[in-house]
Amino acid sequence: MATSSLRTQIILPKALRQEIERVRRLTRESLGEYLRKAAQERLEKEKKRSVNLALLVRKIGTVKKSGWEKVNVLEWQRKMREDRDI
């Protein structure tokens, strides 16, 4: 299965480009290959962050529906830790 590509041109600060060149020579990757991998890793990281944020929003919604919305959770945690000597 062939994938189509789109040519993209970017301008990098000189210091960043030099650092990339130093690292990519060690990995023996082309500049394009190195930058594609870096972009892919960033996208995967952002997807995980989005999923975690969605889970957090759901969790907060659950807390609000459970009657905890009027409780200062941080204060409650502090008190629980004091009581348990944590």
Image: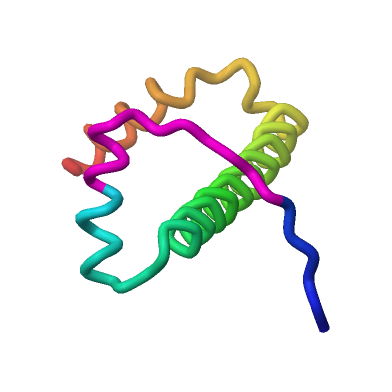
Q: Is residue 28 above or below residue 71?
A: below
Q: Residue at x 72, y 34 (%)?
A: 66
Q: Is residue 20 left or right of residue 52?
A: left
Q: Does residue 59 appear to the left or right of 32 in the view shown?
A: right
Residue 30 position, x and y percent, is 41, 65
Q: Residue 81: horizontal and vertical position, in percent?
A: 27, 37
Closer-to-camera residue (76/20):
20
Q: Is residue 27 above or below residue 51?
A: below
Q: Count of labels shown? A: 0
Depth check, front residue: 86 or 50: 50
Q: Residue at x 49, y 18 (%)?
A: 72
Model colouring:
rainbow
Residue reaching furthest left? 85
- Against 53, residue 72 (above or below) is above
What's the residue at 31%, 41% (across, down)? 17
Residue 24 x, y percent position in the rendering: 30, 62
- Which stretch appears magenta? 7-19
Q: Judge left or right: residue 41 versus residue 47.
A: left
Residue 14 placement, left or right of 67: left
State the residue in front, 85 or 9. Answer: 9
Tell me if residue 77 is in the magenta stretch: no
Q: Residue at x 38, y 21 (%)?
A: 75
Q: Where is the C terminus found, in terms of image quarters?
A: top left
Question: In the picture, which quadrant includes the N terminus?
Answer: bottom right
